[in-house]
Image: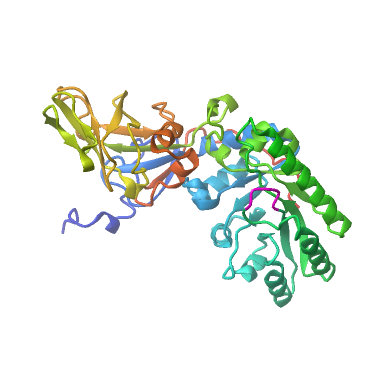
Amino acid sequence: MSTDYLPEHRHPFRDRPRPGSGPTGTSSTTGPLKRNGPAERAAVVDLAAIRHNVATLRSWVQPAALMAVVKADAYGHGALPVARAALDAGATWLGLAHVSEALELRESGVSAPMLAWLHTTGTPFGRAVEENIDLGVSGWELEPIAEAAQRLERPARVHLKIDTGLGRNGATIEDWPAVVARAAELQESGLIRVVGIFSHLAVADEEDREAETDEQLELFHQAVETAREAGVDPDVRHIANTPGILHRPDSHLDLVRAGLGIYGLTPFSDRPATDFDLIPAMTVTTTVAQNKAVPAGQGISYGYRYRTAAATRLALIPLGYADGIPRPTIAAPVAIGGQRYEVAGRIAMDQFVVDLKTDDATVAPVGATVEVFGPASGISADEWAAAAGTINYELVTRIGARVPRIHVDTRPGEDVGAPTGESR
């Protein structure tokens, strides 16, 4: 009996792209794909670009060690394949926001040192201790972590966080002496080991605000001295994020936390990723779903924020805000058949429209490949972020689960190296 009428999710193995149907190199994929030919829509992630970016950032920070931040499913790029690629390229640590994210990597066989730093009263601290996951501590977490360590009869590995000005988690300057004193007591009793002290830069991506970064670094160094005086001498000090890596070598210290940079994106509004030899890893692609002729004055999408200036053809693109394309986007570019066009009208839940500005029916036919952003077209996530009034971090991270991630490796074996710095 034919099964061609069955829903796509009934054919998980047939959904994988066939050799030669996608980008060059080896590949893996997650999520349902169109069964015949390329995916209906996809976020293609080049692991060679991830390795290249990690190697490039390592060259900026040696001899400091590099932590690859793969929180939020690696900024939407796929945590497990990105983590493995980053480690292959010499990253020494992995950074996660939540313990649950770290546990997923452990369960997939990743044994590298990991740090998770954002906790609630429901965080499974015991599982983290069991799985040798380092825990960021702002203050209150010390007691439940120590209780878990005592119950398991093994010390917990912690990194104490000082808030040097960002105003999020981390102990305040006023509370810091009490936090390090308690940490010293728990370390003396064998319940914890203070592996690191860390903080986070607030404005290192704004090069005209050096004084504020200087102040944060000064406060951080003072906090480390306070900890040492209390008997806490960490293995690693870390405060640098990607902008700190690229712009503030005095922030590199023992370990850096590279997030945005490993995905080939720039943290600076006025400096493209190419300035730093970083390669965007993600390409978002789909195909034209409809091509039709319309008259002059045709309103497009909700609210008629756009009307055609002349008789033209419209291409329907099957991606919308349910897929992570920001609804407020105005006139963002896409590439079809090697030509750039702009989004016309509002982004809808599942689709948006491009005015082809031609009456030629052979332009952008149904099934033609559409690149929303990616290195092949030269359209950057930064352009889309600007058109949506957001940042490139958010744009790539919000690409939804309905868009399968396809992982390719266009340069197998390249940019693989030994890690720098010490992890233990």
In this picture, is 139 found above or below 362? below
Would residue 167 appear left or right of 370 to someone viewing this image? right
Dominant secondary structure of the residues highlighted in magenta in the image: loop
Estimate the x, y position of residue 279 in percent, counting from the top left.
Answer: 52, 31
Q: Which of 150 and 7 is in front in this view?
A: 150
Say which quarter of the image contains residue 189. Answer: bottom right
Q: Which colour scheme is used?
A: rainbow
Q: Can residue 301 be seen in this view?
A: no
Q: Where is residue 7 in the image (x, y as percent from the top left)?
A: 23, 56
Q: Which residue is drawn at 60% across and 63% down?
A: 119
Task: Classify residue 250 as left or right of residue 19.
Answer: right
**Residue nearest the observer in this picture, 164 or 125:** 164
Q: Which of 212 and 269 is in front in this view?
A: 212
235 lies above or below 375? below
Q: How many numbered discs sit on the rendered protein? A: 0
Question: Which residue corresponds to the image point at 59% horizontal and 55% vertical from the top-left?
Answer: 110
Q: Report the span colored magenta.
A: 163-167
Residue furthest to the bottom:
151
Image quarter (top left, top right, bottom left or bottom right) of the N terminus: bottom left
Quadrant in which residue 100 is drawn: bottom right
The answer to whether residue 202 shows anywhere in this view is yes
Magenta-colored stretch includes residue 71: no
Residue 88 coordinates in the image, percent (x, y): 61, 42
- Using the image, determine if residue 334 lies above or below residue 191: above
Residue 339 horizontal/vertical position (percent): 30, 23
